Image: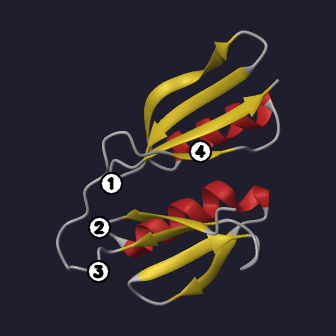
Amino acid sequence: MIGYVTIGVSDMAKAKQFYSELLSNLGAKVLLDMERIAFIGKSMGAPMLAVCKPYNGEPNHPGNGNMVAIQPGSKEAVDAHYHKAIELGATCDGEPGQRIPDQFYGAYVKDADGNKLAFFHFG
């Protein structure tokens, strides 16, 4: 159902590198780069993450309550993605842990522009 999610960034080169490296083990890469916006994912037919400089030319602002949630496949993969994001320059917004007993395991970071990401696993 979701085609892509777009987040605003201030430095396209840095954002493309961060998200390409962070999601590379999930098979993601920059699929389409149009200078102001780039689409990162497995294929153009699968859900993607787009990073862009805002169309109106004004500075980007992360939305309060907005978050991109990534499901890497296991609790161990949640931990690995959280630590990789931190190594790539993200800041912690919630260390990995069980949030709902036996149901939801998650970790939270913010990228260099303040965009919030969640890595999660159900079960």
Which disc number belongs to residue 69?
4
> Could you say which is closer to the camera, residue 87 or residue 77?
77
Location of residue 66 in the rendering, given as x and y in whole percent from the top left corner: 41, 46
- Inspect the image, locate mark 4, and give the three-letter code of the amino acid beneath it: Ala
Determine whether 117 is above or below 16 in the image: above
Residue ID at (70%, 22%): 104
Mark 1 or mark 4, earlier in chain: 4
Question: Badge 1 local density, few (<14 within 10 Å), some, or many (20+)?
Answer: some
The residue at which mark 1 appears reads as 113
Distance from Cα at disc 1 to Cα at disc 3: 16 Å
Mark 2 lies on a secondary structure that is loop
Question: Badge 4 local density, few (<14 within 10 Å), some, or many (20+)?
Answer: some
Mark 1 lies on a secondary structure that is loop
Q: Are circles 3 and 4 on residues that touch, CB within 8 Å?
A: no
Quadrant holding the C terminus: top right
Residue ID at (63%, 38%): 119
- Inspect the image, locate mark 3, and give the three-letter code of the amino acid beneath it: Tyr
Q: Are circles 1 and 2 on residues that touch, CB within 8 Å?
A: yes
> Could you say which is closer to the camera, residue 42 or residue 85?
42
Residue ID at (21%, 79%): 56
The residue at which mark 3 appears reads as 55
